[in-house]
């Protein structure tokens, strides 16, 4: 991973889980913001872009799947990893269909979760780099001497 800290948004309605995981992720090199529901997560994304979202599927109000759909509409480059505590396979499949990077079961082993987040961030950054290079090539083609 590059020297720039990966920016992560952790969205879960369970405050204790969210707080504890955010602290561990921050200690392992992520810049972490948290939200307790989908609506707050979307507001945060609108004001403060991030590389990846770790998103609980089951939340009151806007579900994780509904939140994912909104993220895909308005923040297409952000990678999303879904978390489920219920072995909710149909929702996880729906999330993958909507473009989630992956889904993980709660509780999940921390090192494996961290590695999955690193992979998601790397994918996003590689895609951004390819886009930047394509834009540079397009600009060079437009320069006339």
Image (spheres, grey):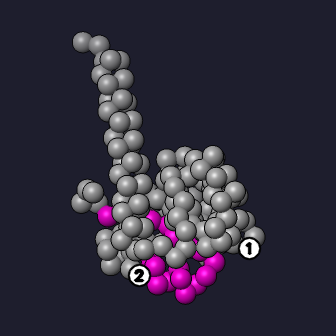
Name the disc covering residue 23, or none: 2
Quadrant occupied by the C terminus:
top left
The tag earlier along the polypeptide, 1 or 2, is 2
Quadrant occupied by the N terminus:
bottom left
Query: Is there CB contact under 8 Å for labels 1 and 2?
Result: no
Q: Position of residue 73 (x, y in %)?
A: 63, 47
Tell me if residue 49 can be seen: no
Asked if 120 appears above or below 38 in the picture, the reply is above
Residue at position x 33%, y 41% in the image = 129
Residue at position x 37%, y 55% in the image = 119
Q: Left or right of 82: which side holds 38?
A: right
Q: Position of residue 4 (x, y in %)?
A: 29, 60
Name the disc covering residue 105, or none: none
Q: Position of residue 37 (x, y in %)?
A: 65, 72
Q: Nearer the viewer, residue 25 or 39?
A: 25
Asked if 53 appears above or below 86 in the picture, the reply is above
Residue at position x 56%, y 52% in the image = 100
Q: Nearer the viewer, residue 112 or 118?
A: 112
> Quadrant location of residue 30?
bottom left
Q: Nearer the viewer, residue 95 or 44?
A: 95
Q: Nearer the viewer, residue 104 or 27?
A: 104
Residue at position x 63%, y 47% in the image = 98
Magenta run includes residue 114: no
Q: Describe the element under mark 1 as helix, strand or loop.
A: loop
Range of the magenta residues?
5-22
How would you rate the neighbour count of disc 2 (Cα within 10 Å): few for under 14, some for 14-19, many for 20 or more? few
Q: Describe the element under mark 2 as helix, strand or loop.
A: helix
Tell me if residue 133 can be seen: yes
| CA separation in Å, label 1 and label 2 | 24 Å
Q: Which residue is mark 1?
A: 60
How would you rate the neighbour count of disc 1 (Cα within 10 Å): few for under 14, some for 14-19, many for 20 or more? few
**Which residue sits furthest top?**
145
């Amino acid at each position: 991973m590059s020297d720039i800290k990966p920016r992560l948004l952790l969205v879960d309605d369970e405050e204790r889980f969210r707080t504890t995981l955010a602290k561990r992720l921050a200690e392992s090199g992520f810049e972490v913001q948290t939200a307790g529901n989908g609506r707050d997560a979307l507001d945060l994304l609108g004001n403060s872009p991030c590389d990846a979202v770790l998103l609980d599927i089951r939340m009151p109000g806007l579900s994780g799947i509904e939140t994912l759909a909104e993220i895909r509409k308005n923040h297409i480059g952000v990678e999303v990893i879904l978390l489920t505590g219920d072995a909710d396979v149909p929702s996880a499949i729906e999330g993958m269909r909507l473009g989630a990077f992956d889904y993980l079961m709660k509780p999940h082993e921390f090192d494996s979760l961290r590695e999955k987040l690193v992979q998601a961030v790397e994918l996003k950054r590689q895609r951004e780099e390819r886009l930047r290079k394509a834009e540079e090539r397009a600009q060079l083609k437009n320069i006339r001497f």
